[in-house]
């Protein structure tokens, strides 16, 4: 397998506050990687760094071997990174279909088109003329993921897609993951639910207070190991 | 009664010009939360540009439009890329100070180049041509202003809803940060918006030059009219801007019908009344 995303010794700052400390993380092409950790552990900061929303030191993030750290967000998006951001962040005054179409702004070729995305999430076709803000939470989440898929990314970042949604809706959303993988897209999933995170991912990273304190193949990590890392007992136990 | 109706009719047509004054301001504020205090001075600069091309070089007014609109659009694009993009951000103060500086500079440059004399563009037969409509006479120039406003605002509306660039501009006013994640370069997007606004400014300037007297210091009052039209119509709404322009035009027309000295005052009074009764404007952009 080839390394798609390589993050090396990544530090991230909000002004004087340091949120990430020397994070190392790799994603191989077509792989699903879960990123877990408590609130404030730095998961969203990590995704903001990868997408260029938060500027970082050049050389610390490589996509297919080429540096993307410090590049503006639009260049990173065009290089093949798309995100369904935390809180969905849909364009409220645009219709569902207009939101989806904007995802394709970069003009990258690939398996996903408006028709394919609408086939994956049929509700998006049904509600295509409605304002994005008129939809239910789960439907809005589908718009956010569909919008990211429209970019035909090599790497898809899903930030807390289950937040505030009913379990049955979350299941529907995650049922789209095999189809996304089958198209060759690698995925980083940020998830609060550890059980779900291990179930859907190949490998898992656990962040605690801005540092990676556990990583490994998802099926080989025990719940106790992850739980300990999640709540910060890993280092003292080791 | 006929006089009153005539005043309203002429006010509606004048409103088209005010809507053209306001369209660029409305677009730039809607897309990038940016207020160009030199907007009115750029309109006057376009008027002097037309004067230069038509009166001094002898070009027909239509040709002046064909030259000035692309020239202003190109200038707007470059100005945004090279200068204004540097002051874009959360704080609107740097942009306001910068364009205030432009305003002062432009007024003085025009004063230096064209003197303080009041000027008007001679459009030949167009100046006096009119269409009879029942008891009223509709001048070609006011009619031209109004139809131009309809075409410009209609075209802008289509652009915003039917093109990807237009949709990106609407999206930018919803959530500018996420537009970057879509792979859109904000600097380019802003420059396109400014280019369009500047093209409309050129059009408005040429029409104003034909319609009224102007001098190097008449920019700020045009800016004021544009602000009033935008705010009465509702920020970010294109057709609201036309409605705002028409209300301002009609108020001024009725004021002038009572006493010519009341023309400008009547516009301001109606603006204040609407601002008090409906501060969000008549047709605010739907934002659920």
Image (tube, rainbow, N blue to C red):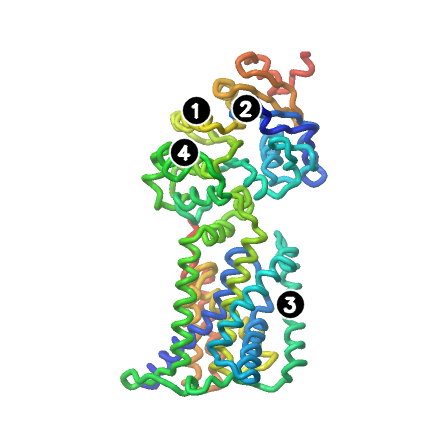
Do the residues under discs 2 and 3 have CB atoms within 8 angstroms?
no
Give me the C-alpha separation between circle 1 and circle 2: 13 Å
| Furthest residue toward left | B134
Give me the C-alpha separation between circle 2 and circle 3: 52 Å
Front residue (pair B155, B281): B155
What residue lies at 45% left-to-right and 69% top-to-bottom? B19
What residue lies at 38% left-to-right and 35% top-to-bottom? A116
Q: Which residue is mark 4?
A: A138
Q: Are marks 1 and 3 on the same chain?
A: no
Q: Which residue is mark 3?
A: B100
Does the rendering let one see residue B114? yes
Q: Secondary structure at mark 4?
A: helix
Q: Closer to the camera: disc 1 or disc 3?
A: 1
Tell me residue A173's x, y (percent).
42, 29
Q: Which mark is residue A178?
A: 1
- Relative to A73, residue B137 above or below: below
Q: Closer to the camera: disc 4 or disc 2?
A: 2
Neighbour tally class for label 3: few under 14, some 14-19, many 20 plus, Cα within 10 Å:
some
Do the residues under discs 1 and 2 have CB atoms within 8 angstroms?
no
Q: Which mark is residue B110?
A: none
- Relative to A232, residue A111 above or below: below
């Amino acid at each position: 397998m080839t390394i798609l995303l390589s993050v090396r010794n990544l530090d991230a700052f909000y002004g004087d506050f340091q949120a990430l400390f020397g994070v190392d993380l790799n994603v191989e092409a077509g792989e699903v990687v879960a990123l877990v950790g408590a609130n404030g552990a730095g998961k969203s900061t990590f995704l903001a760094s990868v997408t260029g929303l938060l500027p970082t030191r050049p050389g610390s993030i490589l996509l297919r071997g080429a540096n993307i750290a410090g590049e503006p967000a639009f260049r990173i998006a065009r290089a093949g990174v798309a995100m369904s951001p935390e809180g969905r962040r849909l364009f409220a005054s645009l219709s569902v279909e207009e939101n989806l179409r904007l995802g394709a702004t970069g003009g990258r070729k690939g398996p996903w088109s408006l028709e394919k995305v609408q086939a994956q999430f049929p509700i998006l076709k049904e509600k295509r003329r409605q304002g994005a803000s008129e939809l239910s939470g789960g439907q809005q989440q589908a718009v956010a993921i569909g919008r990211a898929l429209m970019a035909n990314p090599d790497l898809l970042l899903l930030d807390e897609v289950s937040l505030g949604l009913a379990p049955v809706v979350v299941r529907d959303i995650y049922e789209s993951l095999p189809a996304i993988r089958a198209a060759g897209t690698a995925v980083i999933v940020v998830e609060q639910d550890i059980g779900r995170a291990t179930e859907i991912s190949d490998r898992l990273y656990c962040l605690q207070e801005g540092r990676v304190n556990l990583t490994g193949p998802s099926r080989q990590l025990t719940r106790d190991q992850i739980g300990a890392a999640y709540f910060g007992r890993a280092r003292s136990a080791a | 009664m006929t006089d009153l109706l005539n005043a309203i009719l002429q006010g509606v047509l004048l409103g088209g010009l005010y809507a053209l004054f306001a369209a660029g301001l409305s677009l730039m504020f809607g897309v990038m939360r940016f207020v160009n205090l030199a907007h009115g001075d750029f309109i006057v600069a376009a008027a002097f540009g037309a004067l230069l091309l038509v009166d001094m070089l002898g070009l027909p007014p239509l040709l002046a439009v064909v030259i000035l609109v692309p020239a202003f659009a190109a200038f707007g694009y470059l100005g945004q890329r090279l200068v204004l993009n540097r002051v874009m951000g959360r704080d609107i103060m740097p942009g306001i100070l910068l364009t205030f500086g432009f305003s002062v500079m432009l007024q003085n440059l025009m004063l230096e180049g064209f003197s303080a004399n009041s000027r008007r563009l001679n459009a030949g037969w167009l100046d006096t041509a009119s269409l009879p409509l029942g008891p009223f006479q509709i001048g070609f120039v006011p009619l031209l202003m109004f139809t131009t406003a309809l075409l410009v605002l209609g075209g802008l509306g289509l652009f915003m809803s039917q093109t990807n660039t237009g949709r990106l501009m609407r999206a930018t006013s919803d959530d500018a940060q996420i537009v970057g994640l879509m792979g859109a370069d904000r600097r380019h997007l802003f420059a396109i918006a400014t280019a369009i606004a500047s093209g409309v400014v050129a059009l408005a300037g040429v029409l104003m030059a034909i319609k009224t007297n102007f001098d190097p210091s008449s920019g700020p009052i045009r800016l004021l009219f544009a602000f009033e039209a935008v705010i009465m119509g509702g920020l970010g709404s294109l057709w609201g801007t036309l409605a705002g322009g028409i209300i301002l035009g009609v108020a001024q027309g009725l004021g002038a019908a009572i006493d010519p000295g009341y023309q400008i005052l009547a516009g301001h009074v109606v603006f204040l009344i609407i601002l008090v009764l409906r501060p969000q404007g008549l047709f605010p952009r739907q934002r659920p």
